[in-house]
Amino acid sequence: EIVLTQSPATLSLSPGERATLSCRASQSVDNYLAWYQQKPGQAPRLLIYDASNRATGIPARFSGSGSGTDFTLTISSLEPEDFAVYYCQQRGYWPLSFGGGTKLEIK
Amino acid sequence: EVQLVESGGGLVQPGGSLRLSCVASGFTFRKYSMNWVRQAPGKGLEWVSYISTRSSDTYYADSVKGRFTISRDDAKNSLFLQMSSLRADDTAVYFCASFFESFDYWGQGTLVTVSS
């Protein structure tokens, strides 16, 4: 089973700042890595798939990078609506798995 | 518009059974694989199960293997999760979802509470 470890668990930043979220896999997942945003009471929303491809309708301030075991989600300049919980997910190997999440909170 | 609507959640006693349903619309259901994902109260996301097109392949998380069964009825655009031998740690919101590359849709979830 592939374990995804996200860091930090909580990130406190102000609007306009840059956010860098990390996801590390216990073994290579190639580029089969997705990033989701989830707000309270809502289903997750896909941001990035295949490590670096933005999903339809996702603003350009969101970008993903990495391959193998180390991945990064970057939000270049935080907007008020970006404060939420972010999850990485590996889609390449069974069983599929999610990271534990990073909560992005307003400082 | 793509829609996934779950139903069947509720309160069940430990050891009991429950069947969740998910009705899809707005896309050609039979052409897409489907998943169940759950989220315990205040916790993260946990993938539960997968079913391929034509039901040719199914996969389960270790935590539910042997207790849960995923199935689909393409004629009714429906996905199911039969849950048995339920435990307190199965308490969660259960989402049906289809995710493959950029095709990514989730329902709003149905709450399952396992408690005496």
Image (spheres, grey):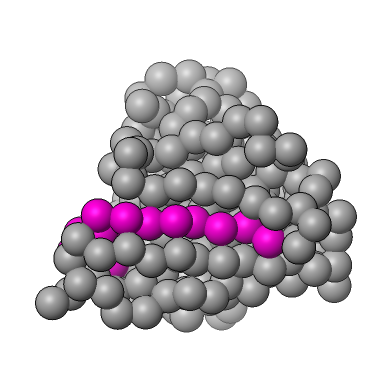
- Image quadrant of residue B88? bottom left
Q: Give the residue at x 58% y 21%.
A: A30
- Image quadrant of residue A95? top left
Kindly tell me whether residue A3 is visible in this rendering: yes
- Image spot of residue A17 (x, y percent): 52, 65
Q: Nearer the viewer, residue A2 or A23?
A: A2
Q: Quadrant of the N terminus of chain B?
A: bottom right
Q: Nearer the viewer, residue A81 or B89?
A: B89
Give yes or no for residue B87 being in the magenta stretch.
yes
Q: Give the residue at x 29% y 43%.
A: B63
Region of the chain picked out in magenta, as a range:
B78-91
Q: Is residue A12 left or right of residue B13?
A: right
- Image spot of residue A43 (x, y percent): 55, 69
Give yes or no for residue A18 being in the magenta stretch.
no
Q: Give the residue at x 52% y 26%.
A: A93
Q: Residue furthest left?
A: B116
Kindly tell me whether residue A37 is visible in this rendering: no
Q: Give the residue at x 68% y 61%.
A: B78
- Image spot of residue A31 (x, y percent): 62, 27
- Image spot of residue A100 (x, y percent): 34, 50
Q: Nearer the viewer, residue B57 or A64?
A: B57
Q: Quadrant of the C terminus of chain B?
A: bottom left
Label tally: 0
